[in-house]
Amino acid sequence: MNETLIILLSIGYFLATVSLISALIFLIVVAIELRRGINAIKEFINSTKTKLDPAILETEKIIQGVKSSVDDVNEVTRKVRELSEAIEKLSFIISEVLTTVQKLKSSVSLRTSALKTAATVAANVFLENLKKGGK
């Protein structure tokens, strides 16, 4: 039985050694593959950064252009608003001038009418006095 036990222990030791060597080889292969994967990821990140940097700069320029355009539109909108207010004030002033002209026209018309009436009355009175004075 001792020999069987020694043989079994030897086989177990051999299997444990083979398992340990297999595990070490597997871990070495995994470490090499992980290193390759990490290097591939680093290379991908660097190439992506190299490709994205110009795109990011171009996007920033576009955003600045859009911001400038929006500022210009805001300025134009402000000026249009000011122009609209000025036109509104001008419209009010023209309306007031037209009202004043209309009142002046009515006043002149009344004065002309009154002057005509006064001239007619004066002429009639003068003619009446001439008729009375001439007889």
Image (cartoon, grey):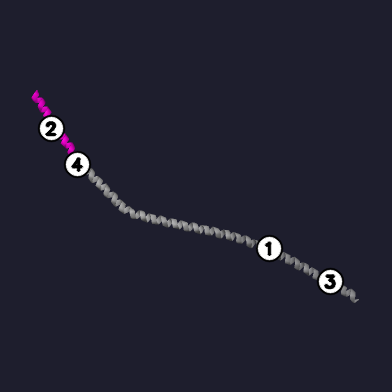
Rounded to the nearest angstrom, the CA distance separating label 2 from label 1 is 123 Å
Say which mark, if any, is on residue 29. 4
The answer to whether marks 2 and 3 mark residues whose Cβ atoms lie closer than 8 Å is no
Quadrant location of residue 81?
Answer: bottom right
Is residue 105 left or right of 128 when viewed as pictured? left
Q: Amino acid at mark 2?
A: Phe
From the image, tell me which residue sits under label 2: 14
Residue density around tag 3, few if under 14, some if 14–19, many if 20 or more, within 10 Å? few
Rounded to the nearest angstrom, the CA distance separating label 3 from label 4 is 137 Å
Tell me the SS state at disc 1: helix
* Residue at 63%, 60% in the rendered image: 92
Quadrant location of residue 22?
Answer: top left
Say which mark, if any, is on residue 33. none
Mark toward the start of the polypeptide (1 vs 4): 4
The answer to whether marks 3 and 4 mark residues whose Cβ atoms lie closer than 8 Å is no
Residue 115: % across, % down: 78, 69
| Residue 109 against residue 50 in the figure, above or below | below
Q: Nearer the viewer, mark 2 or mark 3?
A: 2
Mark toward the start of the polypeptide (1 vs 3): 1
